[in-house]
Image (cartoon, rainbow, N blue to C red):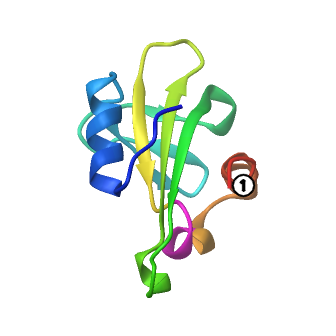
């Protein structure tokens, strides 16, 4: 697994390696607002993750997940999967993300 110092570096590095879709969490699935891609928790794997902790401010904490569909047709990223998203995320999605916490 690569090593990155910042969220931006992680996103750029992953994009260079083919993780080009920006996913968002919509309760029980991953969606991409730029196209019609939508993945349920059983349809994707988290292949890498990078956790960034703020040195002085907990609000600076972020997690970047590299996601690949099980059929191998799409690769993308999720950022900040916790915090604001936690209340609106399904139990299945939280379990999937927590494995990599």
In which quarter of the view is residue 87 placed? bottom right
**Nearer to the camera, 53 or 72:** 53
Judging by the rendered image, the residue that carries numbered circle 1 is 98
In which quarter of the view is residue 40 placed? top right
Q: Secondary structure at mark 1?
A: helix
In which quarter of the view is residue 13 placed? top left
Residue 74 picture location, percent across and down: 41, 21
**Nearer to the camera, 50 or 76:** 50
Q: Is residue 47 left or right of residue 6?
A: right
User: Residue placed at 44% from the left, 13% from the top?
Assistant: 73
In this rendering, the answer to whether 67 lies above or below 70 is: below
Residue 25 picture location, percent across and down: 49, 53
**Nearer to the camera, 87 or 54:** 54
Residue 55 picture location, percent across and down: 45, 79
In this rendering, the answer to whether 27 lies above or below 3 is: below
Q: Is residue 41 left or right of residue 84?
A: right
Magenta region: 81-85
Q: Alpha-carbon neighbours of circle 1 within 10 Å: few (<14), some, or many (≥20)?
A: few
Q: Is residue 16 left or right of residue 37?
A: left
User: Residue placed at 29% from the left, 47% from the top?
Assistant: 9
| Residue 41 is one of the magenta-drawn residues | no
Dominant secondary structure, magenta: helix
User: Residue placed at 52% from the left, 60% from the top?
Assistant: 81
> If the image is split into quadrants, where does the C terminus sit?
bottom right
Residue 63 picture location, percent across and down: 50, 58
| Residue 83 is one of the magenta-drawn residues | yes
């Amino acid at each position: 697994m690569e090593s990155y110092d910042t969220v931006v570096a992680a996103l750029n590095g992953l994009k260079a390696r083919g993780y080009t879709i920006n996913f968002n969490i919509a309760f029980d699935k991953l969606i991409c607002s730029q196209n019609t891609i939508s993945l349920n928790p059983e349809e994707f794997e988290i292949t890498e993750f990078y956790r960034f902790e703020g040195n002085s401010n907990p609000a600076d904490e972020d997690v970047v997940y590299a996601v690949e569909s099980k059929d191998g047709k799409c690769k993308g990223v999720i950022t900040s999967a916790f915090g604001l998203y936690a209340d609106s995320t399904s139990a299945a999605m939280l379990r999937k993300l927590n494995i990599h916490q």
